Image (tube, rainbow, N blue to C red):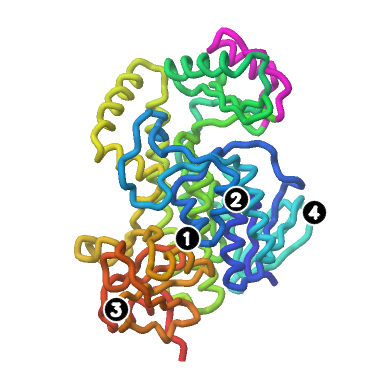
Amino acid sequence: MFDVIIAGGGSTGVMLASELRLHGLDVVVLERDAEPTDVVRAQGLHTRSLEVLDQRGLLERFLALGTQHPVGGFFAGIPKPQPDRLDTTYPFVLGIPQTTTDRLLNEHAASLGVEIRRGCELAGLSQDDDGVTAELADGTRLRSRYLVGCDGGRSTVRKQLGVGFPGDPARHEWLLGAVEVAVPQEELMPAVLKIYKERGGFGAVPLGDGLYRFVTPAAGVAHDRAVPPTLEEFKQQVRTLAGTDFGIHSPRWLSRFGDATRLAEHYRVGRVLLAGDAAHIHPPMGGQGLNLGIQDAFNLGWKLAAEINGWAPDGLLDSYEAERHPVAADVLDSTRAQVELGSPEPGARAVRRLVSELMDFEEVNRLLIGKISAIDIRYDFGEGDFGEGHELLGRRLRDVTLKHGRLYELMHEGHGLLLDQTARLSAAGWADRVDHVVDVSEEVDAPAVLLRPDGHVVWAGEDQADLVKQLAKWFGAASS
C-alpha cells in the first residue's frame, strides 16, 4: 500500500509529491500521458511561487533558465510601474515556459525518489475507513492511505467523488500556438502591439529561432476545446484581426482555451482531496493558474504528511480547504474582472480607462499587484479579529537576512521553524518537527516568530507558555 496516490503529473501533482517525500512518505504519481507535453500554456512564475521554490532550495536553477520582468502591468495588461519596496526579495515575474518548469520540478521529484508512472490513467476510485482503491484504465488496482486529484479541469477524481463544480461556462475562446512567421520581427511586433492596444486578447511573443507564441481570439466557443484548431483556422482568425496572417507556418503545436470559471464545492471528501485545476479553473489573464496550483500543493503537502505520520492536531488537514478555497475564489474574481477589462466593447474599454486612472494611486496599484503576485495572502486562523494579534499573523514571512545567513536557506527540509531572537525560548518537545534557530534579523519586528513549513507565521511574541500552546495547535503533541 502506498501512503499517497497522486492522479496527475503536472506541476501541481509533482510539487505535491515532492513535498510528501520530504516527510518520508511512499508516493506514486499517475500520469495519463505517456510523454511530457510540448504545449506551453503558462509562461511565468509569480513572486510567491518563486519564494516557494527558494524555501525548498530550487530557485537558482529556475532563475538560470528564465527572464526577469517587472511585475507592473500584469493586471489586465494595464501598463503601470510597480510600487517601490514590495514586501519580497523577488519583486519580479520570472518568464519561463511551463515545459521548463515541469521539467525542473520532475528532476527535483526524481532526486527525492518520487515514482512517476506515465501512460497510467485513473478510471475509478473507492474509499473506506482504511484507505483508497484506485482503478486504472487497464484494470490494475492500486491501494493507498490517501489519494489527491491533481488531474486538471476535467478531473476524473472530482467527478468520481461527485463534488460539484459550479461557475460560469466559457463565453469566449482564444487560439494559442507556437508558429513561425514569414515577416521580420521588426515588422511583426509593432503590428501586433497596435492590435493589442486597440482590442486586447491578441499577442505574439518571440521564443527564439524564428518561433513565436501567438494568441488570437477565436470565432466562437468550440464544442470540445480538447480538439486543437487547424492551422487554417488559426491563420484565418489572425487575418480577421490584423488584415494579414503574417505568413504563419510550421506550427509546433496549436491549442485553444476559454474563459470558463469554476470552483469545486469541496476540496476534501474523506481520504480523497483535490488540488490545482481539479479544484478550480479560470481564464489565464494575469498568469495565475500554474502558480495557484503550486501554492495549493505547498499548503497541502506538510498537512497531509502530518496526518499520515500521526502527529497532525485535530483539524489540520481540513485547514487546507479552509485556507485555499477562499484564495481560489479571490483569484476567480480577479480573472473575471481582467477578462471584462480586456473586452473590445465600448463600455468595457471605458471601465478599463477608469481602472487605469485609479491604478495611478499607489494604494490601488499595490493592491492589484498583491493579488497577482499572491504576496498579500493572509490566512484566517479562526482566532478572532487579526487586529488583536501581531501584524504578521497569518501572513507568509518573506526571506529575511539573518546574522548567520538568510531565512529561506533554513527551510529546505520542510520543517516548521522557530526564529528566536531572544535566545530564551524552547521548542524541545517538537524538535523532530520544528527547527529552533537562535539568530537575529533587523527585518523581523518581533522577539520571535513561529513559522509553519509553508512559511506562514502562526505566532509572534516572547512568552514561552503562549508558544507552547501554538506549537501544540500546529504541530501536535510534544514528544515524550
Q: Nearer the viewer, mark 4 or mark 2?
A: 2
The answer to whether marks 3 and 2 mark residues whose Cβ atoms lie closer than 8 Å is no
Label for residue 138? 4
Write the start and end of the magenta stretch as one range. 227-252
Please tell me which of labels 1 and 2 falls first in the chain: 2
Q: Are marks 1 and 3 in contact (CB under 8 Å)?
A: no
- Residue 422, numbered label: 3
Whole-percent x and y of residue 58?
A: 56, 57
Residue at image mark 1: 299
- Marks 1 and 2, Cα distance to the nearest angstrom? 14 Å
Residue 11 tag number: 2
Q: CA distance from mark 1 to mark 4?
A: 33 Å
Secondary-structure class at tag 4: loop
Sequence-wise, the earlier of marks 1 and 3 is 1
- Give the residue type at disc 1: Asn
Callout 4: 10 Å neighbours few (<14), some, many (20+)? few
Residue at 49% across, 55% down: 296
**Residue mark closest to the camera, 1 vs 3:** 3
Residue 309: horizontal and vertical position, in percent?
55, 77
Between circles 3 and 4, the one closer to the viewer is: 3
Disc 3 secondary structure class: loop
Quadrant assignment, res 426: bottom left
Percent of width and height locating residue 444: 30, 64
Amino acid carrying label 2: it is: Ser
Q: What is the C-alpha distance between the residues marked 3 and 4?
A: 59 Å
